[in-house]
Amino acid sequence: MHIRKSPRWQLKQAEATPESVYLNRRQIMAGGLAAGAIAASGGLGISKAFAQEDRMALEAARNDAYQLDRDLTPEKFNLEYNNFYEFGSHKEIASAAQALEARPWEVTIDGMVEKPIKMDIDELMAKMTLEERLYRHRCVEAWSMTVPWIGFPLRKLVEMAAPTSGAKYVRMETFNDPSVARGIKTQPWYPWPYVEGLTMAEATNDLAFLVVGAYGKVVADQMGAPLRLAVPWKYGFKSIKSIVRFEFTDQQPVSFWEQLQAREYGFWANVNPEVPHPRWSQARERVLHTGEYVPTQLFNGYGEEVASLYTGMEDLGDRLYR
């Protein structure tokens, strides 16, 4: 008999946040309906026509292996409090981000792969089975939220890419168009485009998730439409938005924030309450919609799933969390 041990952060079904707590959503339908809904749109500007709370429905079956120990953050807060430096270095960028054209959107998969791929985002989504996962999100700025993401595991894209045996990292890149994103034009001192990276072991861990929706709808522009990453055991700046390229490489990527200030924002960026940011403590976090301060958990509470990725790396000291 196969017995599956539940991770420490997973709640019993009876303890999960009631459906009525977030949006009184309709009965969740099978993930396969998502691709059909997008195809039915005829490829029209989904992000523009369904901005903010009126975004197109994108329903997927919830994966109950991923639960929370706190209520979901109401959608309003996730739509109005965003870091997206391409549109400005402040949180109120939602309006400016509506300039993003999320359709058409081409994704490139290249580098150390058997055959480079260029694919439209809707074609990519049609190849994947979408699911909903409830994840914590912890910002390096010491605030947190919870999100019902819709998407698919990053490992599925890795499998499709068929990287060669020498590939050690996945380097990801955000769009770079100053005619769309005014922050690129007005902040030329930043090292555009936004770049992030994971080791192959991190990228193929089941928690690493590529997001195409949230709150039962296509993901909002200001949240990283049409394709973003969610790696919930790492600080939020690792969860790159509006991805246009996945490059498989044997060289460790130098990320956007690492180029700016490696001492504060390094490659690893694992959540650790014992390692303070050089300018503030990480021991507690402010829960966005309640204002409550709660203790920060190692690996944001996902240690049972990811701690083994870093076994034997203790000699890196606090660089492991930078």
Image: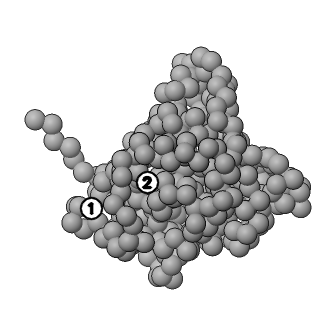
Foreground: disc 2 or disc 1: 2
Q: Would residue 288 be seen by someone viewing this image from the given angle?
A: yes
Picture coordinates of residue 289, whole percent (x, y)? 51, 78
Tag of residue 59: 2
Is disc 1 surrounded by few (<14), some (14 to 19) or many (20+) residues within 10 Å?
some
Left/right of residue 154 with respect to residue 117 in the rendered view: left
Picture coordinates of residue 103, whole percent (x, y)? 68, 46
Q: Of the residues shown, which amino acid type is indicated by label 2?
A: Glu
Left/right of residue 231 with respect to residue 254 in the rendered view: left
Q: Which is more toward the observer, 310 or 286?
A: 286
Q: Residue at x 37, y 64 (%)?
A: 26
Quarter location, residue 199 = top right
Q: Which residue is drawn at 73% across and 69% down?
A: 95
Q: Residue at x 69, y 68 (%)?
A: 94
Q: Which is more toward the observer, 13 or 4?
A: 13
**Is label 2 in a helix, a strand or a loop?**
loop
Q: Of the residues shown, which amino acid type is indicated by label 1?
A: Leu
Picture coordinates of residue 6, whole percent (x, y)? 24, 51
Query: Mark 1 = which residue?
Result: 11
Instruction: Specify which label sits upstream in the sequence, 2 or 1.
Output: 1
Is disc 2 surrounded by few (<14), some (14 to 19) or many (20+) residues within 10 Å?
many
Q: Which is more toward the observer, 145 or 23?
A: 23
Picture coordinates of residue 77, whole percent (x, y)? 56, 74
Left/right of residue 158 with respect to residue 256 in the rendered view: left
Q: In the displayed structure, would residue 136 be above or below residue 281?
A: above
Q: Would residue 233 be seen by someone viewing this image from the given angle?
A: no
Left/right of residue 230 with respect to residue 205 in the rendered view: right
**Is label 1 in a helix, a strand or a loop?**
loop
